[in-house]
Image (cartoon, rainbow, N blue to C red):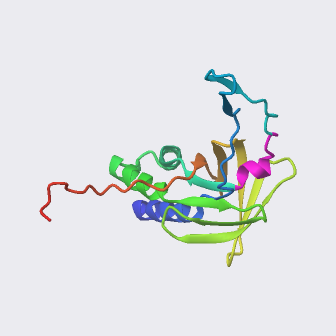
Amino acid sequence: MIKLFNGLWMVALCTLLVACGGNTQNENTGDTAKSDTSAGNNTTKTSEQAPPRPKTPKELLCQKWGYDATSFVNALAANMFANNENNKMTEEQKKQLATMAESAFYQFESAGTYTGKSPAGLAVQGTWVLSSDNKILTLRETGVDNVDIRVIENLSAEKLVWKLTQGNQELSFGMVPFTEPANTEKTDSTAKQ
């Protein structure tokens, strides 16, 4: 019965966790190099550019975030072990969760909406609000009465760490800019045509 409960708990948590992002436009943050060939020499000059203005937390959040699969699986495993010492996640379960997490994401739009896919493969969408101190992210999924509160522990262009609390259980894990999972199927180059 406990294994069934823990299995359902994992599926419920996976369903709740989704990655987001919105701004997929890349920005050049370094200086650009120009070649000066007017004097007959091939020296390289660096043009002076004003450094880009720091992004606000809202701007940093507005992109497509994917699960840091290792961080996510470790958080789930630690939470399961903390609640029941006899129920430890197997390596096979960890691999399965990591595979599920690799395709999950949240995409936050600057208009305060989000779309995504949970680790369980369910599509999600709704609205989001960032608190004035930029520490609390409130997600309201379309068609769901409950709000999802996440405490932002760290936010940069490369990493988002948030804590999700449900009842007595807390999960703190990282998100990274989303990249499509690599296709693991191998083609046989020696196959007959």
Image point (43%, 52%), residue name: 98
Image point (79%, 39%), residue name: 52
Residue 78 is a magenta residue: no
Q: Position of residue 121 (x, y in %)?
A: 48, 67
Give, as a single range, the part of the protein colored magenta: 53-62
Q: Name the quadrant containing residue 131.
A: bottom right
Q: Position of residue 38 (x, y in %)?
A: 69, 27
* Quarter of the image with the C terminus in it: bottom left
Q: Name the quadrant containing residue 147.
A: bottom right
Q: Position of 152 compared to 185: left or right?
A: right
Image point (45%, 45%), residue name: 85
Q: Is residue 121 above or below residue 159?
A: below
Q: Position of 81 compared to 149: left or right?
A: left
| Depth check, front residue: 118 or 36 | 36
Q: Position of 1 compared to 167: left or right?
A: left
| Depth check, front residue: 69 or 52 | 52
| Residue at the extreme right of the image, as rendered | 132
Q: Is residue 174 above or below residue 140?
A: above
* Quarter of the image with the N terminus in it: bottom left
Q: Position of residue 155 (x, y in %)?
A: 71, 43
Residue 135 seen in the figure: no
| Depth check, front residue: 68 or 190 | 190
Image point (54%, 64%), residue name: 118
Q: Position of 123 compared to 29: left or right?
A: left
Q: Name the quadrant containing residue 27.
A: top right
Q: Position of residue 68 (x, y in %)?
A: 53, 47
